[in-house]
Amino acid sequence: MTSIESKRVQYRKYLERAGVIDALSKALIKLYEEQNKPEDAIRFVRKFMCESCPDDAQYDVMKNDLEEAKTHISKLEQELERLRGQIKKSPEEYQELTTEGYKSLMDDEENVSSLLRKYLTPELLEEYMLVTTPAPVDAYLYDCAVSGFEHHDAPVGIFAADADSYDVFNKLFDPIIKDYHGQMDNENDVLQKDPDFGNVDEIENLDPERKYILSARIRVARNIEGLPFFPKLTEKQFIEVEEKVRSATETMDGELVGSYLTMADIDAETQAEMVKRHILFQRGDEKLTTAGCYRFWPTGRGVYHNPAETFLIWVNRQDHVHIMSMAQCGDLGDVYNRLVNGLTELEKTLAFARHPRYGNLTACPTNLGTTLRASVHIRLPLLSKDPDRLIALAEELQLQVRGTDGGELATVEDGVMDISNKRKLGFTEFELVKTLQDGVVALINAEEELEIAGQEG
Ligand code: ADP
Ligand code: MG
């Protein structure tokens, strides 16, 4: 007898000895004999097998108790988070945390590619360690770099805690920004041109026959002038952002008319379902957690959307607002037109933070400039059989390929991927949307060539 077989025999003997087989058989026979087969068969078996088990009424009471306890715990956790958020660190504590964080980042010899590690020299650390942005925010370098100090694999590793961070810690932010956005040689004072949405009519439906493109989306991020960014927003300010956005949306008209839902009012199941449909965000990213993005969650978070779900505003996801326009087809022109209209409307009431050199300000330096990401979810089954070629082609076209959940390309399902403009800073909004348009057209052409080659071959 093999060892597996002998183990199996031993186990069966043990189950018999312990009466398990007998008890299970009786329960199954009882169920078999039952005239009206219960919907919940497991509950029936459980009840039969365990006489001391709670009856249905008791079970319901216990379930309620558990729910209440869970709610209570989550309230206490929020309270704890809130109190933690109110503890002010002394300059000495900041100094100690910064020194430790820096040391652990620099000592790590495996994860060496973050831009924070690359540009935060010991001299800069010394210079900036005890400097703060203006009151009342008083952001330290640590407030910006804490996530990169902890997550050494972060590609960038730094967030601006407020608009002033970009100036106060400029000798660190500037090289990081130029490195990321590929503008190392551009020493001009102005990296980002003035906003220019161009001639919206030049952007078109990229797939009128609905053969390849499942959906199109364009988003921009904005932060309200005068309020800190997420790493230093107070609980009150999270609510202030929400209130300001909510009242700004009240004047929307036409297809932009919609309603605002605050996160706390959306039950967990609906949230999950909305995330799946790409119209809501969730918390969870570790790097953002460390950066302070989810403090006081779900306070101040929410979504504004029209009934068609083609125009949306996410409030306090990361930046104060993510404004987006979507379509369940390839009509990029329609999407772009609506985005421009929606943004123009919002700008009538809300003033957003802008920088003379970096354009629209976002907490993450990778989003600066236009902050615009135009994307399509597209199915290119033949091209995506050769990911290396596809990625090389996309690079050439200044496009980025992601999985449809926003993650790495590895998650491509059924040949569907997320393709978007790669650059955000140094070009106009129109140029970037046009880049996506031209690039997607080129990719569709390449796919069609493969189709023809396949038919001929
Ligand atoms: P961003 O940083 O532009 O907000 P993410 O990659 O974080 O983008 O994705 C946010 C959400 O938007 C995800 O649910 C993603 O699937 C969805 N999304 C992005 N592009 C599209 C698109 N073209 N069509 C439908 N959903 C999209
Ligand atoms: Mg994102």
Image (spheres, rainbow, N blue to C red):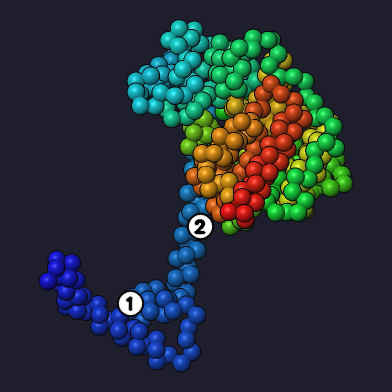
Residue 18: x percent and y percent? Answer: 19, 76
Q: Is residue 7 visible?
A: no
The quadrant holding residue 430 is: top right
Q: CA distance from mark 2 to mark 1?
A: 26 Å
Residue 388 in the figure: left or right of residue 396: left
State how many labels appear.
Answer: 2
Residue 253: x percent and y percent? Answer: 87, 44
Three-letter code, disc 2: Glu
- Residue displayed at 25% across by 83% down: 22
In the image, is residue 426 above or below residue 432? above
In-front residue for pair 75/18:
18
- Residue displayed at 50% across by 80% down: 39
Three-letter code, disc 1: Cys
Q: Which mark is residue 68?
A: 2
Residue 257: x percent and y percent? Answer: 82, 47
- Give the quarter of the figure containing the N terminus: bottom left
Within-10-Å neighbours for mark 2: few <14, some 14–19, many 20+: few
Q: Which mark is residue 50?
A: 1
- Residue displayed at 45% across by 7% down: 123
Secondary structure under badge 1? loop
